[in-house]
Image: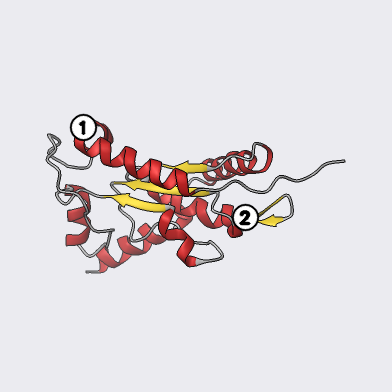
């Protein structure tokens, strides 16, 4: 019981994230938003969801060309095999999160089911499409290798991408 509690604290603690990697990701995304006026779609798989979740407050807590980024839906996220209990967050209006965040977790995902079994909560499964991957967790074998699940991933990504909006451009001169 103590081991489970300690593990749960570590899973939810961002201290394990590599600060250099996280800083680099945030810097690149911020530059895309600021200088390229790009919209960003994060597509994390498995543990990458911890990084993606750590990116959200760092991006949506910033300003771009004098505008608060959290007033615009410039970044979205479609999580695959997410071992986290939530995704996204940080926009000025919480309702804005709903059309720019989604997840696909297989009902038979052995990793997520084991996590839930020992008391570490993850987002629930929301697909039961047949996969040849015995773990129902692999990026290639489960989410991209199955034509049916891949179609769900593509549709979800397209839906989120269409809901994103660019930042206003700043005038110079």
Label 1: which secondary element: helix
Locate residue 98: give its quadrant: bottom left
What is the quadrant of residue 9 in the picture?
bottom left
Please report whichever mark, 2 or 1, sits nearer to the chain's N-terminal start. Answer: 2
Camera-side residue of 120 and 82: 82
Is residue 157 in view?
A: yes
In this figure, which colouring scheme has been used for the structure?
secondary structure
Reply above or below: 115 against 131: below
Q: Is residue 112 left or right of residue 60?
A: left
Side (left or right) of 127 relative to 69: left
Query: Can you identify the residue that label 2 sits on?
Result: 69
Residue 22's mark?
none
Is residue 146 depicted above or below 61 in this figure? above
Residue 99: x and y in percent read 42, 55
Give the quarter of the figure containing the C terminus. Answer: top right
Q: In what quadrant of the picture does the N terminus appear?
A: bottom left
Q: Which residue is pictured at 22% across the width and 65% down the height?
A: 119
Q: Residue at x 40, y 53 (%)?
A: 101
Horizontal relation, residue 167 to residue 45: left or right = right
Q: Secondary structure at mark 2?
A: helix
- Toward the right, the furthest residue is 173
| Point 53% across, 61% down: residue | 91
Q: Residues within 10 Å of mark 1 (few under 14, many from 20)?
A: few
User: Horizontal and vertical percent for residue 85?
Assistant: 33, 61
Residue that badge 1 annotates: 147
Q: Position of residue 31 (x, y in %)?
A: 64, 40
Task: Left or right? Give the position of 31 relative to 98.
Answer: right
Q: CA distance from mark 2 to mark 1?
A: 36 Å
């Amino acid at each position: 019981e103590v081991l489970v509690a300690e593990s749960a604290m570590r899973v939810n603690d961002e201290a394990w994230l590599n600060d250099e990697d996280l800083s680099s990701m945030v810097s690149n995304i911020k530059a895309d938003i600021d200088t390229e006026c790009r919209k960003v779609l994060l597509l994390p798989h498995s543990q990458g969801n911890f990084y993606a979740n750590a990116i959200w407050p760092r991006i949506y807590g910033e300003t771009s060309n004098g505008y608060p980024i959290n007033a615009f839906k410039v970044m979205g996220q479609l999580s695959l095999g997410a071992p986290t209990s939530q995704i996204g967050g940080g926009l000025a209006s919480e309702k804005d999160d709903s059309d720019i965040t989604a997840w696909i977790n297989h009902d038979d995902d052995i990793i997520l089911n084991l996590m839930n079994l020992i008391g570490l909560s993850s987002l629930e499964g929301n697909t039961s499409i047949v996969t040849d991957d015995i773990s129902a967790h692999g990026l290639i074998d489960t989410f991209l290798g199955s034509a049916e699940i891949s179609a769900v991933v593509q549709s979800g990504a397209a839906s989120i991408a269409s809901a994103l909006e660019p930042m206003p451009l700043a005038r110079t001169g």
